[in-house]
Amino acid sequence: MTLVSSFACFRDRLRALDEIVRQLGLTIDDAPENGDGLEPAIVEALRAQTAELEHEIGETLRSFERHVSGATAAGCQQTVNRVWRAMQFELASYDALAELERVGAERGGAWQRWTAVVREVLERCAQTVYETADALALCWRELVETSIYSPGGIHG
């Protein structure tokens, strides 16, 4: 793989991540109506966390598409790390998923179907985050190898 192809692969994965997180936001927004106008707290929390990630990933993608460099890759690394942490400890954490299941079971019907769809999209988000992180690791490897073997590069 070359440096150019590794960055192209990462860009594609970052675009896929942007798309799946946007889909998660739309899925959360499709929460069933309650009749009383009140949403469960888990829906509000998921919505807020997803909106934050959508913004961050979108900014990172636009920055990456404007200019690719080692510094841009470092910014991308920070974003991928943040999204990974958000998936593990917020959006798809044990507590969040348990609360989501509790709400679905308690309210039944459309809520159970919605909960199942949210879980499925969260699983796809997690998989896409892992794939994006792997693609970024290839970029780092190519950057390091390029600097090691280029004239004036690091020699060990």
Image (cartoon, rainbow, N blue to C red):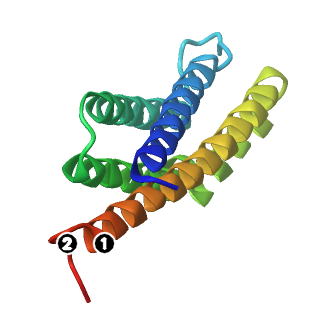
Spot the residue most to the right: 109
Spot the residue most to the left: 152
The amino acid beneath tag 1 is: Tyr
Residue 67 position, x and y percent, is: 24, 34
The amino acid beneath tag 2 is: Gly
Crowd tier of the residue under label 2, counting other residues whose Cα lies within 10 Å: few below 14, some 14–19, many 20 or above: few
In this rendering, the count of numbered labels is 2
Could you tell me if the residues under marks 1 and 2 are in contact, i.e. CB atoms within 8 Å? yes
Q: Is residue 107 left or right of residue 79?
A: right
Q: Nearer the viewer, residue 125 or 43?
A: 125
Spot the residue most to the front: 151
Residue 121 occupies which quadrant of the picture?
top right
Residue 16 position, x and y percent, is: 56, 33
Q: Nearer the viewer, residue 18 or 48?
A: 18
Q: Nearer the viewer, residue 106 or 15?
A: 15
Crowd tier of the residue under label 1, counting other residues whose Cα lies within 10 Å: few below 14, some 14–19, many 20 or above: few
| Image mark for residue 149 | 1
SS type, badge 2: loop
Residue 119 position, x and y percent, is: 71, 41
Q: Is residue 110 left or right of residue 119?
A: right
Q: Quadrant of the C terminus?
A: bottom left
Residue 61 occupies which quadrant of the picture?
top left
| Image mark for residue 153 | 2
Placement of 76 over or under 110, stated as above or below:
below
**Residue under the image location 46 percent in, 39 percent down:** 8
**Residue under the image location 57 percent in, 55 percent down:** 130
**Residue under the image location 23 percent in, 83 percent down:** 155
How many angstroms separate mark 1 from mark 2 (CA)? 6 Å
Placement of 99 over or under 104, stated as above or below:
below
Residue 34 position, x and y percent, is: 65, 16
Q: Nearer the viewer, residue 156 or 129?
A: 156
